[in-house]
Amino acid sequence: MQKLQAISSREYDINKFLGMIVSGHGIYTAPREIRIAGIDAVVVDPHNEVFPYWAEFSGGEQAAVIHVDEHPDMEAVAVMGLEQLDGDLSEYAKQMGCASFIPAAIYYGLVGAAFHFNPDYDRIDAYGRFRGNRFVGTPSLVLREGRIRFDANSAEPTAISPRKLKNELKGFRGKLILDIDLDAFVSVEDYNALSALTGNKAPGYDYALTLISAISQMGRLRLRDVSKLLEGIPVPGLITIARSQTPQLYALPLLADDFERIVIGELGRLYAKR
């Protein structure tokens, strides 16, 4: 009988990782409430699970959202109305897509402006603005045929510089949410792009590890840029972090745990001194 060759735990992790990349599906983790430098925070898996936490935090008052993500998450047409679920926020969060929770939050008055920052670009995409102690230009949404939809062209953002956002929020005294998706730092798209660039369609252990190491370094550089942005913005009252492993895999699974820890640590450092 042929002896089975021992496989290191790291190689086993790589093999599991490659399987997740092929399937496009990672491992679900339940929401976990934590504190970061005294700030209420929650770590979720699919991004839409932040919705009930945003609703509780807003308390009937519109909040501003700093949305750090590889994607804008501003697809409205897929969102049903909350009324169809008798106001059950947790069930509603499960029903909406991970790219649709922000339009729903805007429609129901939880959010007055969302500022999307992808650290690969030196700009902020502003969905609404804060001027003269009030929100202006908040996207207009309507409930039509049981679905939340953008009214006319209100889904188009305004591109502003990070400096302009800092100046705009300098005197902000309202409710502020910092919302982070780990795919802003280490994404499956990074892995696929690097793999395609090198022409390796069936990466093995060593090759996969090389790509993962490169993406980890990229992620740290992106986090540095996010920290620079946050240094000039008021301290949030709520922090939400999405791991984005299910139902669709967006953040690189083998680095999700590491970067969850790294991001939380960096936010703790950033806000502990303020």
Image (cartoon, rainbow, N blue to C red):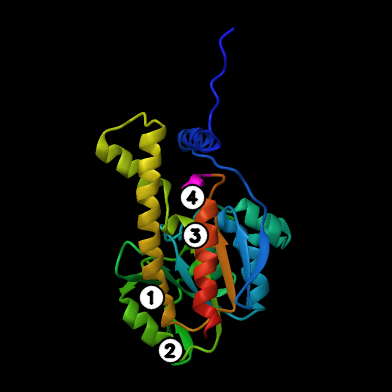
Which callout, 1 or 3, points at the residue further toward the start of the chain? 3
Q: Position of residue 112 (x, y in %)?
A: 51, 77
Distance between mark 3 and mark 2 Cα atoms? 24 Å
Please identify the dominant SS of the magenta region.
Answer: loop
Secondary structure of the residue carrying tag 2 is loop
**Circle nearer the viewer, 1 or 3:** 1
Q: Position of residue 32 (x, y in %)?
A: 67, 60
Location of residue 150 with respect to 248 vertically, above or below? below
Report if the CB atoms under discs 4 and 1 are less than 8 Å apart.
no
Name the image quarter holding residue 236: bottom right
Report if the CB atoms under discs 4 and 2 are less than 8 Å apart.
no
Distance between mark 3 and mark 4 Cα atoms? 13 Å
Q: Which mark is residue 255?
A: 4
Which callout, 3 or 2, points at the residue further toward the start of the chain? 2
**Circle nearer the viewer, 3 or 4:** 4
Neighbour tally class for label 1: few under 14, some 14-19, many 20 plus, Cα within 10 Å: few
Distance between mark 4 and mark 1 Cα atoms? 22 Å
**Circle nearer the viewer, 4 or 2:** 4
Neighbour tally class for label 4: few under 14, some 14-19, many 20 plus, Cα within 10 Å: some
Residue ID for mark 3: 181
Q: Which portion, as a residue range, is magenta?
A: 248-255
Residue ID for mark 1: 228
Distance between mark 4 and mark 2 Cα atoms? 34 Å
Report if the CB atoms under discs 1 and 2 are less than 8 Å apart.
no
Secondary structure of the residue carrying tag 1 is helix
Q: Amino acid at mark 3?
A: Asp
Which callout, 4 or 1, points at the residue further toward the start of the chain? 1
Q: Position of residue 72 (x, y in %)?
A: 42, 61
Residue 100 showing in the rendered view: no
**What's the residue at 37%, 55% (across, down)?**
217
Residue ID for mark 2: 170
